[in-house]
Amino acid sequence: MSISRRNVLQSAGASALLAGIGQSVWAQAQAPLENAKLITGFAAGGTSDTLCRRVATRLQPDYAKAVVVENKTGAGGQIAVTTVKAAAPDGATILQTPTSILTIYPHIYKKLPYDPLVDLTPLSVACVFDFGFAVGPMVPASVKTVPEFLAWAKANPLGANFGSPAAGSTPHFIGALLGKNAGVDLKHAAYRGTQPAMLDLLGGNIAAVSGPIGDLTQHLPTGKIRILGVSGAKRNRFAPDVPTYEEQGIKNATHSEWFAFLLPPNTPAPIVARLNAAMKNALAQKDVIDGLAGFGLEAQSSTPAELTELLKKDMAKWAPIVKQVGFTAEA
């Protein structure tokens, strides 16, 4: 047997083996899982948790016979990311996270325990939303706009504070920009999700909260809070009477955000493809769209490649903003 013939036969044998392995992975990817879990880094009751629970019902039983939601709170959402980073790449563990944990944190943590572009497998965008700025009982009823709040905060430094769902999150930076642009020293209080911050707002323990619009509007019926502004480029359809920051003469605070689904690193392409199709189907269902709308979320989906490009674009966008605010965090 010549060397060339031996090489040809060896190559053919390897190709057949790889083909067999590929068929096995593909077959495994198409079979419904016994169990799957959606991991969120934020508390139950908030927008992130709500999104997970809505989607989980639609992934059953075709993708998995049972899909549960796990709230891995702490470290501003990092615990959820590291949990998924260390999980098996079998499609049974899915991360749902807001953009800031992937696109802002790399600029504020010197020793972030994950690389968003290496340690996760992008799956799909889930939804987009705006942020609002709400005040509670600590702030006089005469304060009806963001500039009026900033003027009140400047005159009342003990009340010049606001809460957000996490240090280094988009609403944290928006609140910081509001104060910085007006020359007001707004103290920031970080919480494990927006809902704990809202409880302190309702109780009069903090003056304001910067958070997802849906987390704020659900508390309007209490009559204890007022939303003074929204962060979108145009008025938010879930709070149409609230003017944007731009309308109130506030520059450089116009930002929307998106939630996304991601998988552990090195998840096989057939599993990614199957779950991406399942996610797109789930996010297109009327009950999911309407359910998310009740929390101020606009359902969307994307390909894994589109999500990858969005991650890269937003990471570049936030670099100069982080530098302007001057916030850094210890890993």
Image (spheres, grey):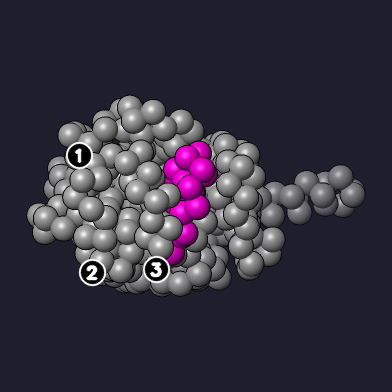
In the picture, the disc for residue 289 is none
Magenta residue check for 177: yes
Q: Is residue 331 left or right of residue 253?
A: right
Three-letter code, disc 2 = Gly
Q: Is residue 49 left or right of residue 187?
A: left
In the rendered image, residue 140, in percent from the top left (x then y), is placed at 23, 53
Three-letter code, disc 3 = Arg
**Residue tagged by mark 3?**
192
- Dot 2 or dot 3: first in sequence order is 3
Neighbour tally class for label 2: few under 14, some 14-19, many 20 plus, Cα within 10 Å: some
Q: Is residue 270 above or below residue 230?
A: below
Please name whichever residue, 217 or 18, is drawn nearer the observer in this view of the structure.
Answer: 217
- Dot 1 or dot 2: first in sequence order is 2
**Residue tagged by mark 2?**
203
Three-letter code, disc 1 = Ala
Neighbour tally class for label 1: few under 14, some 14-19, many 20 plus, Cα within 10 Å: some
Query: Which circle, 1 or 2, is nearer the viewer?
Result: 2
Magenta region: which residues?
A: 172-189
